[in-house]
Image (tube, rainbow, N blue to C red):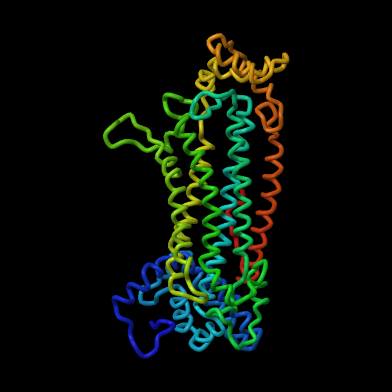
Amino acid sequence: MAKLWHKDYELNELVEAFTVGEDYLLDTNLLGADCVASLAHALMLEAIGILSMSERAALKKELLAVIEFADKDKFSIQRTLEDCHTAIENYLVKKLGDAGKKIHTGRSRNDQIIAALRLYARDFLLQFQSACMMLIRSLLDATKQYQNIPMPGRTHMQIAMSSSVGLWTLSFAEQLLDDLCLVDTAYKLNDMCPLGSAASYGVPLALDRELVTKLLGFSKLQNNVLYVNNSRGKIESIIIDALEQIVLTLSKLAQDLILFSMPEFAYFTLPQELCSGSSIMPQKKNPCALELVRAKSATLAAYSLQIKSIIRALPSGYNRDFQETKAPFIRGINTALACVEVMNLSIQKLKVNEKNLLKGFIPEIYATDAALELVKQGVPFRDAYKKIGLHLAELKSYDPQHMLKAKTATGNTGNLCYNKAENEFNKRKQLYVNNGIHVENTYTKLLGKRYQLFKAIF
């Protein structure tokens, strides 16, 4: 089978292996997206008179067949074909002859791969947002369950002030809701149709770019055809950067869980099915999944840096360097999703040990509270601070529950304002559901059969 660019010579075998790299393997992820984009492109070619109705119908039938084969892992891409675009087009030519040869009209592999990546990324981001919302839901549920369970607050890893498990869980829920704002921005920037830009400079055909944008359900057309190709890698890096912020938050959550589940603390007990063992020490139950979440936050940052380093000094227009951005992008998004799913499982199955938490409430934890009692009696804070600090041995204990409830300022243990996070969760949930329904309806209309993006939306 021929390469799309094949003419009257053969590529050196070493050069072929070097230039193709693992692209043909990575492209198995993009088969469905490339077929969907080709369906929209074919409808547009019919609209402007390049394809007949019967040719377009035949192309649709075979593109749907490729999607079905891909879903069953029965559509292979050989290294000699370089990528999914060549494999699909050769399949169409073999099945349909001239109709298959016409599908590439007005299109370059440059805007073709960008379109496939945009569709693939859009589906992924909806899935990722859904996974994040499930994790946030777990944290919110834990907050309601444990909001009144005292937990020693620490700074510099030393006993600081009284806190609660609910304050701890809600802190991560609120942070993740804010982190998702960056994912929302990445989704918006990715949601632009690149088709019709060809190899950076358009083509002298009356392509209806607006029609393709509508057919694929993109929120807007990416207008400037040179900008389309210049944005390759840039959009992918923005997505990875946004995901990295989510996983950066998870790395701190993972570290807390690792630390506070140590026998010396035993604030929490991790479910044993999430912990692997040692090859030599029979007693070990290691929090390996959480340790890897911690490590993978750095791996994700490296993927982002890799993409940005590749595109940093490229001239305008297409350059083969872009090919090297595909692997870190695909690996990066899969890494981020796995981290979210593992962390959700960890929170759902976490056991909170209230007795061990209460052991941390030694008298020193109330030092600031004691100083503020003097302030209420008219003593200047700095004097109260010094007096308590010089007489720590005389500190009395307080009722932990009472001290939690005494902190009534907004966002404190006695006034978590849980409903603020719940309202933000519901607002964001509706946004994601609407986006998911839009994409599902778009694909259903384009494919002519029911398309289900999610098995369930949170």
- Residue 400 to residue 425: above or below: above
Count of labels in the image? 0
Occupied quadrant, residue 79: bottom left
Q: Is residue 153 visible?
A: yes
Is the residue 235 above or below the residue 343 in the image?
below
Say whether residue 13 is left or right of residue 206.
Answer: left
x, y percent for residue 249: 53, 43
Q: Residue 336: horizontal and vertical position, in percent?
A: 49, 51
Q: Position of residue 451 (x, y in %)?
A: 60, 63
In the image, taking residue 458 as reference, residue 244 lies left or right, namely left
Residue 40 pos. (x, y %): 61, 75
Residue at 60% from the left image edge and 47% from the top image edge: 133
- Residue at point 67% right, 66% down? 219
* Residue closer to the observer: 23 or 123: 23
Q: Nearer the viewer, residue 446 or 200?
A: 200
- Residue closest to the far left: 280
Is residue 448 visible in the rendered structure shown here? Answer: no
| Relative to 246, residue 9 above or below | below
**Image side of residue 338 versus residue 57, left or right:** left
Q: Residue furthest bottom?
A: 8
Quadrant for the N terminus in the image: bottom left
Question: Residue lying farthest top?
Answer: 394
